[in-house]
Amino acid sequence: MRPSLIRLIRPRRPERKTPPLLPPLKLYRSILRAHRSKLPSELRFLGDEYVKAEFKAHKNTDNALHIVGFLTQWQDYLRSIDGGTWQEGKMTQQDLDKMSPEQVSQLYELMQETKRIGQQ
């Protein structure tokens, strides 16, 4: 069969730009496993506690759009931990503008805690 006929019979699937979302429990476990192997011990406790609190806080969320956004952001975080790019991560002004005042204050508290740990 000629290649042009194959394309007519079986069209190419569009390639996915992002990998499919992991189920919440698998993502949660993968993040904790990545913390165990990739983070320094001083930051591991802080990271584990934050991940546990966030997943627990969002456990009963019913809004599908919110769930997809939550899982997407945590999956991106997992990729940055696995790839070793987490230390180079910088937030843009656009990212900050999208955050609620509560999220900005949480981020500030996290920054203060990591600075405190870094000075010890």
Image (tube, rainbow, N blue to C red):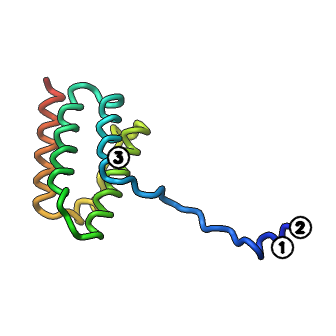
The alpha-carbon separation of the residues under discs 2 and 1 comes to 7 Å
Which residue corresponds to the image point at 39% horizontal and 53% vertical from the top-left? 22
Residue topped by disc 1: 5
Quadrant of the frame with the N terminus? bottom right
Residue drawn where x is 35% and y is 46% of the image: 26
Q: Residues within 10 Å of mark 1 (few under 14, many from 20)?
A: few
Please tell me which residue lies in front, 29 or 95.
29
Q: Secondary structure at mark 3?
A: helix
Residue visible at 35% across and 30% down in the picture: 38
Task: Mark 2 and mark 3 in contact? Answer it, CB < 8 Å.
Answer: no
Residue on which the image places disc 3? 26
Q: Is residue 105 above or below residue 7?
A: above
Give the numbered dot on residue 1. Answer: 2
CB-based contact (under 8 Å), mark 2 and mark 1: yes
Gap between marks 2 and 3 measured at Cα: 43 Å
Which element carries disc 2, helix, strand or loop?
Answer: loop
Q: Position of residue 54 (x, y in %)?
A: 18, 50
Q: Could you tell me the amino acid type at mark 2?
A: Met
Side (left or right) of 22 relative to 59: right
Residue 30 picture location, percent across and down? 35, 41
Q: Which is nearer the N-term, disc 2 or disc 3?
A: 2
Which amino acid, mark 1? Leu
In the rendered view, tell whether residue 29 sits above or below residue 103: above
